[in-house]
Image (cartoon, rainbow, N blue to C red):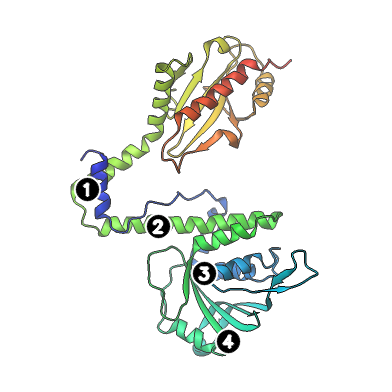
Amino acid sequence: MDVTKENLNILIAKLNGFKHDYSKPIYNPMEQFVDYVSTKEIVHSKIIATLLNPSGEHGLGMDFLLKFLKKILIKVPNISTPNKLNGFEPDISDVKVFTEKTIRNSRRIDILLMAIIGGVKQAIIIENKLNDAVYQPNQLEDYRSEYSNYKTNVVCIHRVDKNEQTPTGANIIIFAHDVANMIDESIKGHQGESIDNLKSYSSYLKNISKQNIIMDNAKIILNSDLTADDFSFIHSLVDAYGQLPRAYAQHLKDMVTQCGYALEASIPTRYDNYCYIWNDDYNNAKPFWVAIGFSQDSVSFYVVSNDEHGWTEVEQSKFAQSLGFEKSSTDQEGTWYKASSDFVLSFQEQGKPDFDVIMKKVKEILAKIHDTKKPS
């Protein structure tokens, strides 16, 4: 089956519930040594409980707590406080947060948040299902009855949105990415090592959500009524997607050689997802060319040098630094210098590269190579 838009639409129609509107997981080295966290809901519960505590070591004060209450649709009124900079503050007091709170029947509440909000005693019961555990019979109803003397809300935290109905006894479901977004919003304006750690945890929450979507998609494919031709089409699509970086590099080379840029371009044998671009007039005097490397959803810019013009390694390094590039590696091609983050372009949202923008940046780099003098 040919990879055409028509065939793709036919396939998508057969995959009811298949989700494609998500970004790929973000690399997070923390995950390499805390894989057990994904199956230990108590670890997540302790972190979330700490964030909900205004006196927690996170240093966010009430920022996360207020974002959380807003997300679960609990209004927090303001009270006038003339001594405050803005003249008011949230009417919330006597905040207490517990984890693994034991109640009757030996049940345990994952997180219990108790506070007086607007003069009303409230108990907010949080059931953490980030490990995809199943609900027990009457579980949430038992939690709610334990605190019948309070205004009670039951919140469930799920790993990913599966369009499920709110469980009996619950007020609302929120998801891992919601908690991550609350963290992101709460840390704005804050600095320090603890904030960097929270960013890492936020990234982790986003990733477990995305990874679960990928697995759910795989299950949808497994349980669908796809034919052998459909599976062949999927295989062809995956193969073609894997070759996109090479196709991008080849397209850029063709664009350079066919569109009158007065430049030269080639695809190196060793790195066929890269396109080398240079100007012979510049390279007669300076041992540098531009290398553009593609992935499926981003493009990175390098300058590469060799010693054919008699430049020392120190001279090459100083020259690259003056262009805004730092040494990355050395191989048979030469010494590679990687650009700053300003020269790493993501095109995930657009779907494919904007080659005009890429060429604009290439010409900017080549102009710098031309204009910059050899280090003395």
Q: Which residue is disc 1 drawn over?
A: 230
Kind of residue indicated by mark 3: Glu
Q: Nearer the viewer, mark 1 or mark 4?
A: 4
Callout 2–callout 4 Cβ contact below 8 Å: no
Q: Which residue is disc 3 drawn over?
A: 41
Callout 3–callout 1 Cβ contact below 8 Å: no
Pick whichever of labels 4 and 3 is earlier in the sequence: 3
Across and down, in percent, residue 92 comes to 67, 76
Viewer-closest of 359 and 376? 359
Q: Nearer the viewer, mark 2 or mark 3?
A: 2
Q: Which residue is disc 4 drawn over?
A: 150
Residue visible at 66% across and 78% down in the picture? 96
Viewer-closest of 120 and 322? 120
Q: Is residue 36 visible?
A: no
Q: Which residue is disc 2 drawn over?
A: 213
Image vertical order of residue 296 relative to residue 214, above or below:
above
